[in-house]
Image (tube, helix red, strand yellow):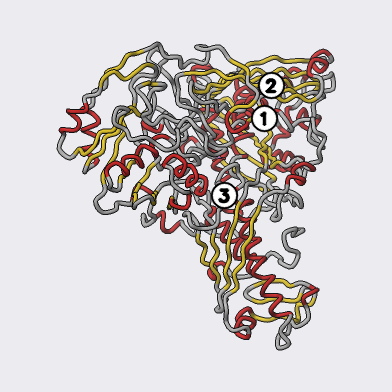
């Protein structure tokens, strides 16, 4: 493994080990303190009132009745809400929403906060909220994707490109011997992390302290600083544990701002925790899509064109669009590629990034469409994918930094037994007479890197403290990052005190984009390397050290000793080196980001192949995913146990996407009828059996100094299509709408 950051530092033995979670015991014994577990003295409770209509105006609120309720201290409405310094319609950081924070009396989606009640107890706040008894002027809501005209755009929220063309799509269509033209739909999905959004806000002068789950601590500080007109260093965010995030906890949103405003107004700490129902609206979701895919191929199965058009729902007041069609760029070698997006403005909360935003919805459809084409061509679905295997990135022609997708196909197919799959649908039954179907899909996810910084300090007793404001949202970052840090310092894991999860530490970047381990890990690796470099300089200059004069050879740091690279008979313990140099600590720091030139030169993706088996009751059309095999190549795996868990989690979300998850609007009234976990289905254990993950060996010298590609999101991408294709294979029915329901098969 080339070690481009610091050639003197080699990897130790912590990385690659299936270490259990450092936070596991605290979580299972209930001692982990989540945001809402904080209850400072003199604290008040805030509850927001969600709009019961989707479009119109609030014409009346019985604030007197609410304020008169015992225990209620304040009622915030657009009439009395103190001003914010930063406009919630602005976008102060690249990752920002425009949000509703009682600016006016308009209602733009069901569930929008229209008032905030603050009280001495949660019960009083809830009762006060009930007594407000809102009156509305209703307008006809538009919540169906057909309720508004799609409009074209160039760049939407987060700078997403709307249109990308490589080659000549019209020529690709014209030269196709076989073609398909299919339209699929994906349902709106809502992040349903176990921990709903919560905040405990406390002002001391113009210093704001927030206990809240955050996937991006520094960015959160910057965002809140903007809205409240204070310097970012005056915002303290403490986010030691998150009960899941999935993208919804990366960005300041309206409910948080209201709770903080209430704390300022009342001069007391304020706690607010969203109910499950309140999660369906003001804190983001995966937007609904309708996607048309036109594929052409020559007689041998070579793709002449992939033409992917997406229509995606967004809100009336912001512009984030699920970039689904972009998923067709960069995966298969086709003569021409075109991805276009249009948006539809609806009376819904603004969508946002949700685990594999764009890739999940887009690849679901792309993989099913390819299956439809394979059927038409009389090819095995895997054979079609291999025929169109991209050796360089289609369109740009860039080489991949690494791409072990062929091995993923081979190992996954072998483990699954794909070779014995009959080509035609409806051929297999199990011993109970259930229909059996097999399908597959390609998984991929890009490898973004953000910016991160870290400090490391080696103490005289050969222990160390490392610091970065990284975030463990449940994915295991605390553990994997500590493994990287310990290796960079050449120390056993238990000698390293890993400090993260709060502001005031070096910026650990964003836990998102599957890039956190690479980015925060890169910074930790660099910081540890800086310490070891300094230690080596001290030893090499010290005539009493066995390492004297060995500086040019470089050192290997391992188990608290420095070894001369290439001559391990010469070594010395850190404690001895430090003792002779006066016992001082050595402090280092480091940062990580990707040089633009590196990204220019290579295409960088993690890849995988997912194989699915479904069983379907031929009479009742009940569906079960009975087996999923996913083989993934994602560069260096820091912790196989945690990486496997992440991949399992992604694949389970794939089951959820394919068969369960859907927020359903009552289009007459505009609200979501299943805004709770009784009606909004996610897979439970009984829905998930036979998960099998293979991590395919892959070394990547370009993607970043550690060779890490990330595993947080890729698991969804191949899985949805694989399941859709397996359902076709079991039944012969092609359902072009996710989630696939029993009634679709009847
Ligand atoms: Mo994620 S949607 O990158 O938190």
On the image, the x and y values in percent for residue 238 come to 43, 53
- Residue depth check, mark 1 versus mark 3: number of the one nearer the observer: 3
Question: Which labelled disc corresponds to residue 327?
Answer: 1
On the image, the x and y values in percent for residue 312 come to 57, 21
Mark 3 falls on what kind of element?
loop
Of residues 525 and 368, the one nearer the viewer is 525
Question: Which labelled disc corresponds to residue 308?
Answer: 2
Q: CA distance from mark 2 to mark 1?
A: 9 Å
Against 73, residue 303 (above or below) is: above
The disc, 3 or 2, on the residue closer to the chain's N-terminal end is 2
On the image, the x and y values in percent for residue 613 come to 60, 32
Question: Is residue 14 in view from this perspective?
Answer: no
| Residue at the spot of label 3 | 509
**Figure quarter occupied by ligand 1:** top right
Name the residue rendered at 56%, 30% in the picture.
431
Q: Residue furthest bottom?
A: 544
Question: Is residue 673 in view from this perspective?
Answer: yes
- Residue depth check, mark 3 versus mark 2: number of the one nearer the observer: 3
Badge 2 vs badge 1, beta-carbon distance below 8 Å: yes
Mark 2 falls on what kind of element?
strand
Name the residue rendered at 51%, 58% in the picture.
505
């Amino acid at each position: 493994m080339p070690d481009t950051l610091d050639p003197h530092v080699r990897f130790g033995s912590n990385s690659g080990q299936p270490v259990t979670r450092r936070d596991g015991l605290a979580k299972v014994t209930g001692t982990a303190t989540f945001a809402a577990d904080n209850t400072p003295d003199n604290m008040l409770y805030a509850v927001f009132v969600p709009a019961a209509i989707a479009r119109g105006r609030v014409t009346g609120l019985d604030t007197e009745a609410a304020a008169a309720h015992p225990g209620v201290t304040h009622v915030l409405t657009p009439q009395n809400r103190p001003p914010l310094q930063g406009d919630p319609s602005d976008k102060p950081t690249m990752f920002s929403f425009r949000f509703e924070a009682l600016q006016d009396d308009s209602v733009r989606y069901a569930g929008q906060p229209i008032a905030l009640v603050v009280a001495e107890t949660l019960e009083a706040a809830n009762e006060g909220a009930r007594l407000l008894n809102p009156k509305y002027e209703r307008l006809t809501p538009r919540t169906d994707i057909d309720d508004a005209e799609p409009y074209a755009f160039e760049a939407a929220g987060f700078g997403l490109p709307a249109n990308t063309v490589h080659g000549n799509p019209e020529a690709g269509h014209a030269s196709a011997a076989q073609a398909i033209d299919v339209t699929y739909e994906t349902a709106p999905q809502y992040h349903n992390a176990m921990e709903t959004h919560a905040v405990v806000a406390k002002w001391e002068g113009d210093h704001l302290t927030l206990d809240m789950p955050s996937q991006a601590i520094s960015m959160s500080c910057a965002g809140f600083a903007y809205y409240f007109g204070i310097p970012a260093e005056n915002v303290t965010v403490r986010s030691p544990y998150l009960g899941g995030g999935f993208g919804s906890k990366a960005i300041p949103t309206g409910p948080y701002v209201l709770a903080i405003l209430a704390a300022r107004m009342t001069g007391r700490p304020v706690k607010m925790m969203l109910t499950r129902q309140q999660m369906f609206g003001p804190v983001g979701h995966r937007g609904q899509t309708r996607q048309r895919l036109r594929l052409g191929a020559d007689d041998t199965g070579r793709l002449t064109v992939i033409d992917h058009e997406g229509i995606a729902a967004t809100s009336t007041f912001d512009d984030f669009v699920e970039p689904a069609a972009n998923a067709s760029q960069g995966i298969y070698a086709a003569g021409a590629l075109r991805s276009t997006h249009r948006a539809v403005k609806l009376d819904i909360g603004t969508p946002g990034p949700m685990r594999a935003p764009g890739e999940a919805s887009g690849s679901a459809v792309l993989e099913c469409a390819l299956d439809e084409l394979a059927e038409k061509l009389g090819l095995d679905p895997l054979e079609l994918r291999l025929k169109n295997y991209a050796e360089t990135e289609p369109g740009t022609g860039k080489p991949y930094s690494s791409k072990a997708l062929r091995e993923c196909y081979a190992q996954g197919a072998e483990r699954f037994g794909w070779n014995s799959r009959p080509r035609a649908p409806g051929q297999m039954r199990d011993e109970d007479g259930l229909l059996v179907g097999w399908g597959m899909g390609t998984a991929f996810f890009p490898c973004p890197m953000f910016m991160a910084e870290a400090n490391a300090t080696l103490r005289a007793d050969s222990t160390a403290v490392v610091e970065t404001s990284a975030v463990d949202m449940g994915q295991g970052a605390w553990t994997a990052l500590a493994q990287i840090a310990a290796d960079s310092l050449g120390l056993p894991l238990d000698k390293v005190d890993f400090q993260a999860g709060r502001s005031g530490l070096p910026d650990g970047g964003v836990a998102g984009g599957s890039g956190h381990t690479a980015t925060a890990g890169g910074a930790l690796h660099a910081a540890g390397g800086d310490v070891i470099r300094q230690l080596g300089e001290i030893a090499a200059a010290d005539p009493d050290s066995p390492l004297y004069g060995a500086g040019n050879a470089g050192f290997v740091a391992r188990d608290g000793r420095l070894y001369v690279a290439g001559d391990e008979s010469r070594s010395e313990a850190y404690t001895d080196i430090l003792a002779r140099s006066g016992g001082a600590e050595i402090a280092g720091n480091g940062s990580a980001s990707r040089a633009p030139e590196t990204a220019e030169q290579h295409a960088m993706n993690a890849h995988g192949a997912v194989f699915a088996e479904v069983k379907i009751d031929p009479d009742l059309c009940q569906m079960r995913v009975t087996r999923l095999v996913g083989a993934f190549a994602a560069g260096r795996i820091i912790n196989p146990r945690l990486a496997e868990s992440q991949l399992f989690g992604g694949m389970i979300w794939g089951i959820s996407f394919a068969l369960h998850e859907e927020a359903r609007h009552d289009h007459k009234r505009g609200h979501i009828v299943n805004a709770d976990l009784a009606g909004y289905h996610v897979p439970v254990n009984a829905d998930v059996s036979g998960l099998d993950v293979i991590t395919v060996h892959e070394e990547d010298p370009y993607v970043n100094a550690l060779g890490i590609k990330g595993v947080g999101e890729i698991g969804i991408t191949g899985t949805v299509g694989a399941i859709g294709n397996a359902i076709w294979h079991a039944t012969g029915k092609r359902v072009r709408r996710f989630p696939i329901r029993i009634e679709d098969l009847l």
